[in-house]
Image: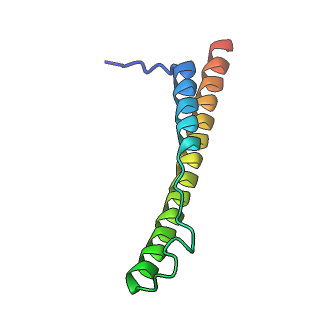
Amino acid sequence: MEQEIKLKHDAVISQLSKTKTALKALTLNTPAKNAAGSNTLDFTSHWLEREEEIAELVKGYIAIVQKSIDDTKAGADLMKHQDEAMIRK
């Protein structure tokens, strides 16, 4: 029993476009260095460091998801072109 898998290229590209738009809207504002004012507690310096680390992690996540979107689009386009080439034969 052979099963046929169909690529709905337009639906895939549409969903990738929506994902890309949502990804662009993803932002994380880090607190300003002077957010704690003259407060010099150890907690505030650790809090600011942690916030910076979280912001870097979010930037890395965004870059990875962007690459995944680009790779998925390239794969979908390649499959579409291969299918079209097979039909032309």
Residue sitting at x 54%, y 52%? 62
**What is the image's colouring?**
rainbow
Q: Nearer the viewer, residue 75 or 11?
A: 11
Q: Nearer the viewer, residue 15 or 80?
A: 15
Tell me residue 18's x, y (percent): 54, 30
User: Which residue in the rendered view is the most extreme toward the left?
Assistant: 1
Residue sitting at x 53%, y 46%? 26
Q: Quadrant of the N terminus?
A: top left
Q: Is residue 20 left or right of residue 57?
A: right
User: Where 6 sits versus 59, above or below?
Assistant: above
Residue sitting at x 63%, y 13%? 87
Tell me residue 69's x, y (percent): 56, 41
Q: Nearer the viewer, residue 12 or 53?
A: 53
Q: Nearer the viewer, residue 33 or 54?
A: 33
Tell me residue 25's x, y (percent): 56, 42
Q: Quadrant of the C terminus?
A: top right
Residue sitting at x 54%, y 50%? 27
User: Where 26 sits versus 20, above or below?
Assistant: below
> Residue 78 sits in which quadrant?
top right
> Residue 68 sits in which quadrant?
top right
Tell me residue 35's x, y (percent): 52, 70
User: Which residue in the rendered view is the most extreme toward the front?
Assistant: 38
Tell me how many marks there are: 0
